[in-house]
Image (cartoon, grey):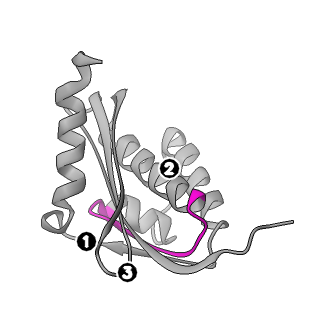
């Protein structure tokens, strides 16, 4: 029997990046509640990847965390035009490596009653970007 979802919205701010393209890469994710309070942060080094793969993986991690928290609605904020528009169905996914992440994200969408995808300017995604850089900078320490 499926658990009833919590009638709440989580705001996901997801970012990924690579130094070089491909190169050392990481993800940063911030989840906020409806009051703007931090629910969770994820900062993770992912090895060598492209910028786009890192962006998608950040989205997947954010969605997985929201599914785990059993929320009914997510607002997914990304500063990547490509990722936002592919997830909205406005752009086709031509790269087969990205298609895997795209399919995973779409499958995770099924865990919510509603998903809004918002393309935001980089300035509004600073905390997630900071988490990306922190993970890349610390990669050699763990």
Question: Is disc 3 in contact with disc 2, using a CB cutoff of under 8 Å?
Answer: no
Mark in the foreground, 3 or 1:
3
Closer to the N terminus: mark 3 or mark 2? 3
**Where is residue 44, by image quadrant?**
top left
Q: Secondary structure at mark 1?
A: loop
Q: Which residue is mark 1?
A: 120
Percent coordinates x, y for residue 78 in the rendering: 32, 63
Question: Is disc 1 in contact with disc 2, using a CB cutoff of under 8 Å?
Answer: no
Closer to the N terminus: mark 3 or mark 1? 3
**Where is residue 6, by image quadrant?**
bottom right
Mark in the foreground, 1 or 2:
1
* Residue 20 showing in the rendered view: no
Percent coordinates x, y for residue 42 in the rendering: 35, 46
Mark in the foreground, 3 or 2:
3
Left/right of residue 29 with respect to residue 17 in the rendered view:
right
How many marks on residues?
3
Q: Secondary structure at mark 3?
A: loop
* Residue 24 showing in the rendered view: yes
The residue stretch that appears in magenta? 68-81
- Residue at 45% in and 55% down: 62
CA–CA distance between discs 1 and 2? Answer: 23 Å
Q: Decide which of 108, 97 is in the foreground and name it.
A: 108
Question: For mark 2, does the 10 Å Cα neighbourhood hold few (<14), some (14 to 19), or many (20 or more) residues?
Answer: few
- Residue 126 within the segment the image draws in magenta: no
- Residue at 23% in and 17% down: 141
Q: Which residue is mark 2?
A: 94
Q: Which residue is mark 3?
A: 34
- Residue at 80% in and 67% down: 2
Left/right of residue 57 with respect to residue 114 in the rendered view:
left
**Residue 103 numbered tag:** none
Question: For mark 1, does the 10 Å Cα neighbourhood hold few (<14), some (14 to 19), or many (20 or more) residues?
Answer: some
Q: Secondary structure at mark 2?
A: loop
């Amino acid at each position: 029997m499926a658990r009833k979802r919590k009638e709440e919205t989580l705001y996901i701010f997801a970012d990924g990046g690579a130094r070089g393209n491909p190169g050392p890469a990481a993800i940063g994710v911030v989840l906020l509640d409806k009051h703007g309070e931090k629910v969770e942060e994820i900062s993770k080094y992912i090895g060598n990847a492209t910028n786009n793969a890192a962006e998608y993986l950040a989205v997947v991690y954010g969605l997985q965390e929201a599914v785990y928290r059993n929320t009914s609605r997510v607002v997914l904020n990304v500063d990547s035009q490509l990722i936002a528009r592919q997830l909205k169905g406005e752009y086709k996914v031509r790269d087969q490596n990205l298609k895997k992440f795209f399919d995973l994200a779409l499958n995770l969408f099924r865990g919510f009653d509603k998903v809004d995808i918002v393309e935001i300017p980089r300035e509004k995604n600073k905390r997630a970007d900071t988490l990306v850089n922190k993970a890349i900078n610390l990669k050699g320490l763990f």
